[in-house]
Image (tube, grey):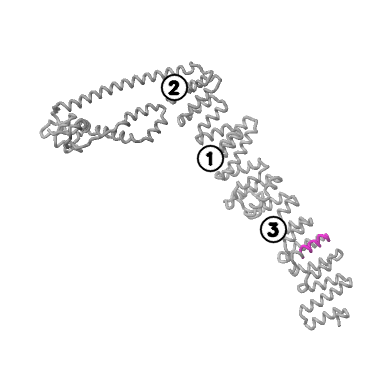
């Protein structure tokens, strides 16, 4: 009856006096609000709807007040909804849009600056809405207060263009977040505030501690706790070579064991500066700076070599060639630049390691149509002194030079022929000597075979006392007391005086016998030798084509007439004893 007569106030009082539950009261408030809404009393209606919060679906009320003229009422309802923590993201968006439409900054600030315990909305949604509506300062405040670092930096950098403040904010973040944000926004910050960004990166890559003041340099002196990989930030300096150089030099100073990428990049920067510098004094300083990096052994060899070649950095290229023992590359470099003196100098310096350098130098000068007689003579002198090339090959090499006359190699050929003549004479002298010694040995062998051996020694060769029976005589001419021989000799079958020399001969024969079958060694020696004939002659002397048989039968063993000569050879070699 009260509803029909629109006596909602009395109905409410009656319901409360009868202790009607909240659902029943909420339904009365809804009907009362609908009644006031129909009558046009929107302010009164919204107050009744507010009393239904928690029971009535908010969308029922919101649809009624979406009209622009009723935005105040909608704002009041949404505020009440947030105060009771029943608002969702859409309600927050709608409320903030209402504030921005009404341009009610005071209400907006009151809403976003409420205490932490009074925040009843989705902060991220609020930041998005405020940013879209152009309330950047409010959005920044909200992001900073609730530690939405990504949103804070986005608004500062993309909307407010406040790069210095963004950099200060990053300097206050924990290490992991500061590192990730510098990787994300480093290029923008480096473009607008290069010096401050470089300082922060130095802190980040050496000894980072969050601080409220991004220019605080005291943290650089504290013990290291967090340190980022400096190589990962090199792309940040893409358009700032000056700052990149300062950053990299700081890194290698603070940490000499920085990654190879740091050293390679710094080398490239120094080479660029060296290539563009016109002042000879400054160019020399830059050259030494680049070489110091190469000597540090922290650069990648291949990359460093490519960089030096790209910038035509001669000293660096030659240093790296020498470091890598690429001596032929050093020669070719000087040849390409037609530095004749440097070619000869390289041969002198590295010729002991690679003798082929002298041959290449001779071929190089031989192909030159210019007058290179002085250099050819110097190269020939060294080739001649060390016997590096056969004369015929030298003549054939120089035949390609139309300016080289016979006078160039005249002295070389004369010296070569004189030495060959001296060598021939020396060889002939040795041949005669060996023939005489061989004839003498053969006569001794024949004498031993056919004649009796008379022993006339009167003193013992061991104790130097007069000989007394029993005594022992050897074919070599030494005689001993039997007790001296038994006391001091290792074997009664060998003369103790001649044993050391005999063993040397036996060892030489065995070694030659073993080396005869080393075919691979023979071919390798023949290939590497400058004089192959000498190698072949040496192997002939070792008996490559003869089979040596060593007879070591005991002296008492019987033998036939066929091996009589072998027995005498054996007796001569190991001095078989005979008792007298």
Residue 492: tell me if it is visible.
yes
In this picture, is 318 found above or below 203?
Answer: above
Q: Which residues are magenta?
A: 91-103
The residue tagged 1 is: 297
Q: Nearer the viewer, mark 2 or mark 1?
A: 2
**Circle nearer the N terminus (2, 3):** 3
The disc at residue 148 is 3
Asked which secondary structure carries label 3, the reply is: loop
Which image quarter is the N terminus in?
bottom right
Q: Are marks 1 and 3 in contact (CB under 8 Å)?
A: no
Gap between marks 1 and 3 measured at Cα? 45 Å
Residue 423, quarter of the rendered image: top left
The residue tagged 2 is: 391
The answer to whether residue 85 is left or right of residue 262 is right
Residue shown at the point (70%, 53%) measured from the top left: 153
The answer to whether residue 378 is left or right of residue 194 is left
What is the crowding at mark 3: few (fewer than 14 residues within 10 Å), some, or many (at least 20)?
some
Residue placed most toward the observer, 264 or 370 = 370
What is the crowding at mark 2: few (fewer than 14 residues within 10 Å), some, or many (at least 20)?
some
In the image, residue 301 lies at what x, y percent?
Answer: 54, 39
Q: How many marks?
A: 3
Residue shown at the point (62%, 30%) measured from the top left: 281
In this picture, is 536 found above or below 44?
Answer: above
Residue shown at the point (53%, 26%) measured from the top left: 342
């Amino acid at each position: 009856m009260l509803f029909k007569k629109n006596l909602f106030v009395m109905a409410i009082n009656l319901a409360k006096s009868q202790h009607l539950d909240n659902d029943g009261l909420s339904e009365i408030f809804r009907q009362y609000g609908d009644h006031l809404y129909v009558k046009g009393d929107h302010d009164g209606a919204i107050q009744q709807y507010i009393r239904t919060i928690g029971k009535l679906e908010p969308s029922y009320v919101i649809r009624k007040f979406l009209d622009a003229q009723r935005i105040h009422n909608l704002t009041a309802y949404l505020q009440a909804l947030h105060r009771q923590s029943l608002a969702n993201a859409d309600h927050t968006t709608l409320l903030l849009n209402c504030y921005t439409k009404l341009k009610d900054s005071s209400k907006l600030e009151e809403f976003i600056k409420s205490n932490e315990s009074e925040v009843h909305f989705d902060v991220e949604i609020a930041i998005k809405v405020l940013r879209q509506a152009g309330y950047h300062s409010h959005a920044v405040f909200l992001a900073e207060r609730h530690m939405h670092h990504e949103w804070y930096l986005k608004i500062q950098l993309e909307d407010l263009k406040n790069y210095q403040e963004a950099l200060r904010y990053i300097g206050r973040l924990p290490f992991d977040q500061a590192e990730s944000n510098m990787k994300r926004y480093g290029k923008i910050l480096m473009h607008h505030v290069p010096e401050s960004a470089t300082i922060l990166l130095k802190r980040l890559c050496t000894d980072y501690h969050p601080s409220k003041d991004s220019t605080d340099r005291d943290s650089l002196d504290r013990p290291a706790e967090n340190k980022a990989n400096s190589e990962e930030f090199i792309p940040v300096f893409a358009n700032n070579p000056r700052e990149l150089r300062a950053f990299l030099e700081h890194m290698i100073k603070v940490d000499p064991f920085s990654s190879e990428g740091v050293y390679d990049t710094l080398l490239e920067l120094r080479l660029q500066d060296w290539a563009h510098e016109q002042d000879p004094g400054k160019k020399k300083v830059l050259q030494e700076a680049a070489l110091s990096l190469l000597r540090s052994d922290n650069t990648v060899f291949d990359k460093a070599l490519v960089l030096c070649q790209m910038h035509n950095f001669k000293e660096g290229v030659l240093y790296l060639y020498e470091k890598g023992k690429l001596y032929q590359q050093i020669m070719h470099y000087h040849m390409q630049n037609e530095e004749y003196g440097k070619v000869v100098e390289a041969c002198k310096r590295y010729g002991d390691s690679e003798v082929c350098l002298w041959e290449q130098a001779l071929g190089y000068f031989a192909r030159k149509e210019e007058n290179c007689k002085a250099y050819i003579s110097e190269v020939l002198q060294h080739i001649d002194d060390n016997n590096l090339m056969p004369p015929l090959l030298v003549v054939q090499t120089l035949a390609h030079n139309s300016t080289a006359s016979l006078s160039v190699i005249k002295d070389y050929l004369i010296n070569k022929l004189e030495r060959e003549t001296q060598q021939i004479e020396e060889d002939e002298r040795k041949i005669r000597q060996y023939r005489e010694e061989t004839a003498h040995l053969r006569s001794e062998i024949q004498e031993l075979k056919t004649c009796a051996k008379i022993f006339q020694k009167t003193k013992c060769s061991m104790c130097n006392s007069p000989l007394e029976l029993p005594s022992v005589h050897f074919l070599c001419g030494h005689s001993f007391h039997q007790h001296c021989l038994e006391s001091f000799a290792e074997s009664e079958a060998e003369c103790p005086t001649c044993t050391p020399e005999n063993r040397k001969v036996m060892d030489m024969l065995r070694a030659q016998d073993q080396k005869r079958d080393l075919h691979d060694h023979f071919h390798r020696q023949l290939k590497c030798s400058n004089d192959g004939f000498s190698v072949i002659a040496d192997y002939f002397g070792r008996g490559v084509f003869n089979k040596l048989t060593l007879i070591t039968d005991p002296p008492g063993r019987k033998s036939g007439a066929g091996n009589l000569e072998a027995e005498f050879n054996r007796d001569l070699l190991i001095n078989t004893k005979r008792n007298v």
